Amino acid sequence: MTKTMKIALSILFLLCLLDWSYGYYQFIRFLGMIGFGVLAYQERDKKDKTWLVIWLASALLINPFVKVALGRTIWNIIDVIWAVLLIVSTYKEKTVKTQIKPFKTRDKFDFKNTTYKICISSDIVFYWINFSYFKHNFANDEEVYNTSIEGVPTFLKLQNSYTKNYDDLFDADYSKFETDTLFTIIWYGYRQELTAKTGAVKKFKSLEIEKIEVYEVNNEGNTELIEICDKERLNSLGILY
C-alpha cells in the first residue's frame, strides 16, 4: 500500500511539469500534504528519523493553507526532487528489509535457527515458560516493531487455565508492520500450576509450546497465515517443551 502511494504521488508530481488549470495544482497541494503526512506518520517508530524529517518538511512546504511563493521554475524542480525521493525511498525500503530480514521467505521458514524477537509484558512473571529451546530476544511494545533489532517479531498466546481459551500476552498492532514483514505467534497450552516459596508463597502457571504460526503482512495491510509448525514437527526439531 505504501509503495503504491509513493509511486502514485511521484507520477502526480511529474505531471505538474505540464500546463494544467489552477485547480489541479490546488488538488496536488491537498493530496501531497496528506500523502507526506501519512508517510511521516509511518516513519515515527523507526530509529533513523531521516525520512520522517523529509516527509514532514515536504508536507509543510506543499500545504495549501500557508502557501510558499517560489515561482513556476523552482516548483518544477521541487516536483522532480519529490518524485525522485519517493522512488528512491521505495527502493531503499526494499533493500533494508532484505538486509535486516534475510530469513524472509514464503517457501521455507527455519523454525529451529531463527531468532524470535518475543514481545512480553509484566504479566509474564505469572507463567513458567522455557524459552531455552530456541534462539530468542525479549522486546518491549516498541522494540518489537523496530526492524533494526534482530529477530522475527513474535507474540505469545497463552491458554487460560480456567476458561481454556487462548489469551494474547500482548495486544499486537499489526498495522505497524510494513508490507511483506513476517511475524510469528507462538501458542502455549496450560500444563499445571506450580507453587514456589520465595519469602511468600507464589503460584505459577506452567505452559508448554503447542505450535508456531508464521504470518506475512500483504500488500493490503492484512495478515496472511503462511506456515504452521505443529507439536510433532516441534518435537522433531528439538524445540518442544
Image (tube, helix red, strand yellow):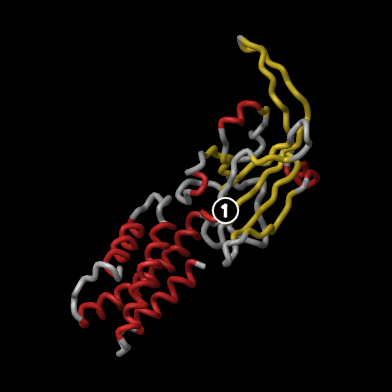
Q: Residue at x 45, y 59 (%)?
A: 96
Q: Position of residue 97 (x, y in %)?
A: 49, 59
Position of 88 compared to 62: left or right? right
Count of marks placed on residues: 1
Q: Residue at x 40, y 75 (%)?
A: 9
Question: For the C terminus, which image quadrant?
Answer: top right
Of residues 240 and 78, the one drawn nearer to the viewer in this rendering: 78
Q: Position of residue 234 (x, y in %)?
A: 75, 44
Q: Which residue is the extreme one toward the top? A: 199
Position of 103 compared to 64: left or right? right
Q: Which residue is the extreme one toward the left? A: 70
Q: Amino acid at mark 1?
A: Tyr
Of residues 112 and 33, the one drawn nearer to the viewer in this rendering: 33
Taking 126 as reference, is 63 above or below it? below
For label 1, the SS is helix
Q: Residue at x 32, y 72 (%)?
A: 82
Taking 156 as reference, is 17 above or below it? below
Mark 1: few, some, or many residues within 10 Å (few <14, many ≥20)? Answer: some
Of residues 187 and 230, the one drawn nearer to the viewer in this rendering: 187
Q: Position of residue 238 (x, y in %)?
A: 73, 40
Q: Which residue is the extreme one toward the right? A: 232
**Circle 1 is placed at which residue position?**
174
Q: Position of residue 119 (x, y in %)?
A: 56, 40
Q: Residue at x 44, y 76 (%)?
A: 8
Position of 157 compared to 21: left or right? right
Residue 21, quarter of picture: bottom left
Taking 65 as reference, is 153 above or below it? above
Residue 193, quarter of picture: top right
